[in-house]
Amino acid sequence: GESVGLHLPTLSVQEGDNSIINCAYSNSASDYFIWYKQESGKGPQFIIDIRSNMDKRQGQRVTVLLNKTVKHLSLQIAATQPGDSAVYFCAEDSGGYNKLIFGAGTRLAVHP
Amino acid sequence: DAGVTQSPTHLIKTRGQHVTLRCSPISGHKSVSWYQQVLGQGPQFIFQYYEKEERGRGNFPDRFSARQFPNYSSELNVNALLLGDSALYLCASSPRQIQGADTQYFGPGTRLTVL
C-alpha cells in the first residue's frame, strides 16, 4: 500500500552545521510532498513543499530535493540552529484532495 | 491573522464515553481535515471535509464521525471511547480542495486521554 517512511529516526548535529533529513515514499503516482516541523506539544508546522514537476525548491535556510526515480525526498537545513530542534515529518498527498500520508518522523537534535 | 484553532486543548475521558472536539479553520479556508497522532508516530488521516461535505475518510471505525458547519468550522466526534483512542487529534485547514492538493496548515491539537 501507500506509505511514507524515513531512513533516520534520530539525527544529531552541531550548531552551525548543515542537516539533511531523508524520506522514502512508495506511491509513484504521488505528485505533492510536504515537510513539517513539530515541536513538543505543538501541531505540525509547514516548512516547505514541492510538486512532482520539480526536482528542487528552496526556502529560507531550507531546501527540498525530490528524486522521483528512486522515490526519495530530502530536507536540507543550512546553518542549523538550536531552534531547529524538533521532529520532522515528510508527508505525501495521496492522489490529491488533502489526504496526507505521514512517515514516522525524524528527531533533529542540535547541540551547541 | 489567527491560525487554526482547536478546543479543548486537553481532555480526559473514561472508556465508553463519547467526546466532541472542535476546530476553527484559518479565515477564508473551506477545507478541514482531521488527523490522529499517537505518541511517537506520524499523524494518520481520519476525515476531510470541503464545503460541508465529507470528501475523504481514512481507515477508522464508525465510532468516529465528523461534520462541517456553514462557517467552515468542524467537529470530530468519537463514541464508545477505547484506551487506544488516546492521542493528539489534529485539525488542518486549506483554502480549497483541488486535484494535486493544497497546502494544509495545522492547529495545535487536542490531547485526549482515555482512562
Image (cartoon, coloured by chain):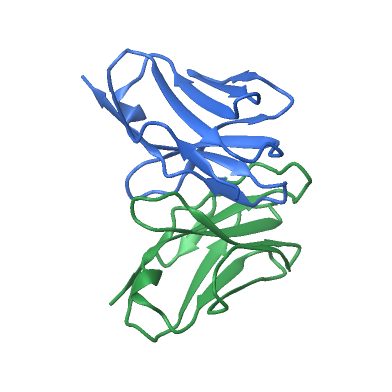
Chain colours: A blue, B green
> Residue A108 location in percent, x, y?
33, 30
Towards the viewer: A17 or B71: A17
- Total labels: the figure holds 0
Q: Does residue B8 show up?
A: yes
Does residue A52 sit above or below A56 in this rendering?
Answer: below
Towards the viewer: A94 or B90: A94
Does residue B98 sit above or below A31 in this rendering?
Answer: below
Residue at image location 60% in from the left, 50% down from the top: A1
Left or right, B59 with respect to A38, comes to: right
Does residue B27 sit above or below A24 in this rendering?
Answer: below
> Residue A82 location in percent, x, y?
29, 25
Q: Which part of the image, by quadrant, shows the N terminus of chain B?
A: top right
Spot the residue most to the right. Answer: B99
Q: Which part of the image, by quadrant, shows the C terminus of chain B?
A: bottom left
Left or right, A48 with respect to A103, comes to: right
> Residue A59 location in percent, x, y?
56, 21
Residue at image location 61% in from the left, 22% down from the top: A67
Q: Does residue B2 show up?
A: no
> Residue B24 location in percent, x, y?
57, 61
Left or right, A58 with respect to B107, comes to: right
Towards the viewer: B105 or A12: A12
Does residue B5 sit above or below A95 in this rendering?
Answer: below
Question: Residue B85 sits in which quadrant?
Answer: bottom left
